[in-house]
Image (tube, rainbow, N blue to C red):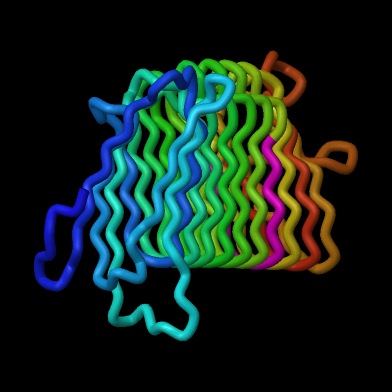
Amino acid sequence: MTEGVTNHMQKDTIVLDREAAERVQALLEMGFGRLNITDGADAMMEGVFAYGDPSYKPEVSYGVRDNIGRLIMHQPQKMGRSIARDHSDWKVSFNKGIPLDLDIRVASGETSVNLSEAHLTALASKVGSGKFATTLTGTMDSLAHVVMKTASGRTHAVLNGTFPKLENYSVSSASGIVTTALGGTFSELGTLDVRTASGTVDLGLAGAYPALRRITIDTVSGAGDLNLVDAAFSDLTLALNCVSGAHVIRCPCDVGVGLHFKSLTGQIDAPALHRVKGMFVNDLYGEVETTLEISISSVSGRVSVQLSEA
């Protein structure tokens, strides 16, 4: 349903019911523009789509097969057109009571995902450039996987709440800034992976992670800040593989810390640790139940390992 034209922007409002779907798989594909995703819709999906040129009128399809609803939103691609004069602004809202697999693919622009009530089961994103921000709060009883990929730009993710089924979280970026903040309770989160070629990696954990066994950071160059000061975990391995750059690892003061460092020309700065049999340890290593094993492999660069104050 087309509402009209305002300031040369056409605006369509689309409302879709779930029909017989027990869960929905949603694919959102946008070449450029702004995409805002929220929850709280009365229908299965409610969307307002604004665009500056009729050529970029979004194509929306929905069908149900084997009790699975399949929703596709696609922005047409026009060869030879300059997007500098064209604008697209999508506002999409989903119903909180329907299990939802969300797959987002954006070439460039600004994307915001802000969900607090949605019955989200999986989140995947693939972004070319621009800004991609995700905020998931509240209780997400069914969310099992989060996978985010970006070529360049800025990826910012905040998960703050209760996530009883989230098993793995991974983010990868060719270049740019990757910021991840995980707070709350993550009962089943076993692995956390961050992979970048260059840029900045900021990772902060503040909550309970009883199943977390391994964090892997793979990066070529750039800077990183890995903050585990407010994280509660059982025995955990943190593997940092980097070629160059500067990285800071912040550790809780009440766990045993063991550091294995392998490098050609890099430097390690760990004033709170002392050397024992080819590794660096703190005074609690081997004396308390919880151990943080840090494995660093670096060609060149500098890594600082810090303990929080009691």
Percent coordinates x, y for residue 56 in the rendering:
35, 67
Residue 153 visible in the shown view: yes
Percent coordinates x, y for residue 177 in the rendering:
50, 61
122, 179: nearer the viewer? 122
Quadrant in the rendering for residue 290: top right
Q: Is residue 89 above or below residue 117?
A: below
The residue drawn where x is 59% and y is 47% is 171
The magenta stretch spans residue 223: yes
Residue range highlighted in magenta: 215-227
Image position of 64 (left or right of 276) = left
Percent coordinates x, y for residue 239 in the rendering:
74, 43
Percent coordinates x, y for residue 229 in the rendering:
51, 33
The residue drawn where x is 52% and y is 16% is 164
Of all residues, the one furthest to the right in this rendering is: 277
245, 25: nearer the viewer? 25
Magenta-highlighted stretch: main secondary structure? strand
